[in-house]
Amino acid sequence: MTIQINIGDHNSPHAGFIPFPDNRRDTMRWARQRALLIARNIPSADVYFRGITAGARSLTQLLADSNMWVNFHATLADFGVTPGAGGFATECAIGPAAFRIGRWTVLATLIHELAHCNGAPGGASTVAEDALVHCGLGRRSELQTGVDDPRTPYTPGLSG
């Protein structure tokens, strides 16, 4: 089994977390499939996710957890949100802004939010965003220098 995409078969307890509209589902399924490929083919992804905090799981473990839900949030101004970031969560949401940019941004947002579900803190921390580099969605040079490469979905220094 894998993480669940809310297509109307889940009622989230979080305000604004709703099923993905029909026109967003293919992109979300593509992002989930791509995340599975990352976990399978990029060992540094699992290593990074396990090291986020005590008790953290690998990306492979998170993606295999059918109790994890990804929802849509139609009015979210940010790309994504995870309630209780910094703790362990079983739900996150992706907003329309990520979809407007494209599927690679949706994938990057999914990885970022899964890092929060795995204990990455919010606030001024960059731990969730830095997961993108370890998942092959950013360059080490961006992480080391803080200089953005617009060809990757990673944003150096992005917190929250």
Image (cartoon, rainbow, N blue to C red):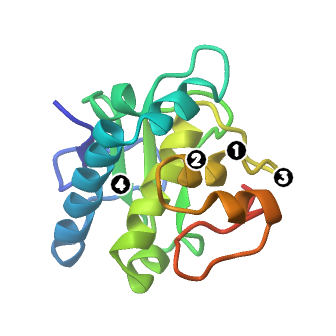
Label 2 belongs to which residue? 131
* Mark before the other along the chain sequence, 4 or 2: 4
Decide which of 87, 38 is in the foreground and name it: 38
Query: What distance separates the C-alpha of mark 4 from that of mark 2?
Result: 20 Å
Residue 46 in the image, given as x and y percentages of width and height: 46, 31
Q: Residue type at mark 1?
A: Val
In x, y percent, where is residue 37?
Answer: 26, 47
**CA–CA distance between discs 1 and 4?**
22 Å
Q: Give the CA distance from mark 4 to mark 3.
A: 24 Å
Q: How far apart are the alpha carbons under marks 1 and 3?
A: 9 Å
Whichever of callouts 1 and 4 sits on the residue coming sooner in the sequence is 4
Q: Which residue is mark 3?
A: 124
- What is the number of the mark on residue 127? 1
Q: Which residue is mark 4?
A: 71
Marks 2 and 1: CB-CB under 8 Å? yes
For label 1, the crowd category at 10 Å Cα-Cα, with few meaning under 14, some 14 to 19 and many 20 or more, is many
Amino acid carrying mark 4 in the image: Asn
